[in-house]
Amino acid sequence: MPSVDLNADLGEGYGVWELGDDAAMLDIVTSANLACGFHAGNPFGLARTTRAAAQRGVRIGAQVSYLDLAGFGRRYIDVAPAELTAEVIYQIGALQALARVAGSDVGYVKPHGALYNAIVTHREQARAVAEAVHAVDPGLPVLGLAGSVFFEEALRLGLRTVAEAFADRAYRPDGQLVSRREEGAVLHDPAQIAERVIRMVDSGRLLAVDGSTIDVRVESVCVHGDSPGAVQIATAVRDRLLADGVELAAFI
């Protein structure tokens, strides 16, 4: 039976600002990419979410970001590599402490937003993130886009790479994500998204925004927890995968 991980970006509330329904999403996904306080999340909220994930047996990942609370981590920052390495180490460490208190641990690392997109091609920053993960724990896998220079740098250091595909994001013909600034970058119809995901998993292919067919590696499927209708989308994806005989399991 084929197996795939289903992940979501969670723990992104901040103070009185609640974003998404973490509790509901944790009942659906197998891995949770938790904010580490740099783009979103605060200690109390993250402690609550790590406990909820641990109670459900959901794998916890550190979602590391540029230091950009105001921009939700979606703005590129030309940060020096040594500084970026230190910031990523700091974020992983903060979430590790919360996860261990909750009876779990950080099982992997996933960059967020603009950092995720930048290190597809920006080798210096990709190396800085990979070196940070390796410094904390060489056994931590990294979640990202197949074919990225981030994966090249991670593999150079001996890190395990896990190829991620996005259920609710449009792709460019070169295999990168369409910018959120462009119309149609984020998909919203649960049934269409579910069909798209099953095609990704079954065939390793999907339709790009220009109508062309591109190859995609899928070890983990991401549904954004902050998207409108995220719970409905994640439920549709889960149900469609299970109906086709695909096992849902964390990649670790």
Image: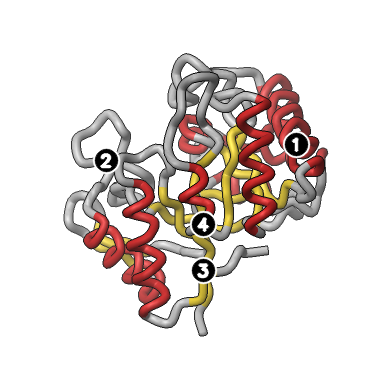
Q: Residues within 10 Å of mark 1 (few under 14, many from 20)?
A: many
Q: Report crowding for label 3: few under 14, some 14 to 19, many 20 or more residues within 10 A (C-alpha).
A: some
Q: CA distance from mark 2 to mark 4?
A: 27 Å
Left or right? Give the position of 215 relative to 84.
Answer: left
Instruction: Tell me which corner region of the image, top left, top right, bottom left or bottom right, holds residue 56.
Output: bottom right
Residue occupying the point 54% across, 49% down: 144
Say what secondary structure mark 3 lies in: strand
Q: Which mark is residue 98?
A: 1
In front: label 1 or label 2: 1
Q: Nearer the viewer, residue 134 or 7?
A: 7
Q: Is residue 45 above or below residue 145?
A: above
Among the two numbered marks 3 and 1 on one chain, the one whose residue lies closer to the N terminus: 3
In this picture, residue 149 sits left or right of residue 156: left
Is 124 or 10 nearer to us in this picture? 10
Mark whose residue sits in front, 1 or 4: 4
SS category of the residue bearing label 4: loop
Q: Name above or below for residue 127 compared with residue 156.
A: above
| Quadrant of the rendering where the C terminus is positioned | bottom right
Residue designated by label 2: 185
Of the numbered discs 1 and 4, the one sitting upstream in the chain is 4
Three-letter residue code for mark 4: Asp
Amino acid beneath label 1: Leu
**Mark 3: amino acid:** Val
Q: Earlier in the sequence, mark 3 or mark 2?
A: 3
Q: The residue tagged with tag 2: helix, strand or loop? A: loop
Badge 2 amino acid: Ala
Q: What residue is drawn where x is 66% and y is 59%?
A: 57
Q: Which numbered disc covers residue 4?
A: 3
Per the model, the C-alpha gap separating discs 1 and 4 is 20 Å
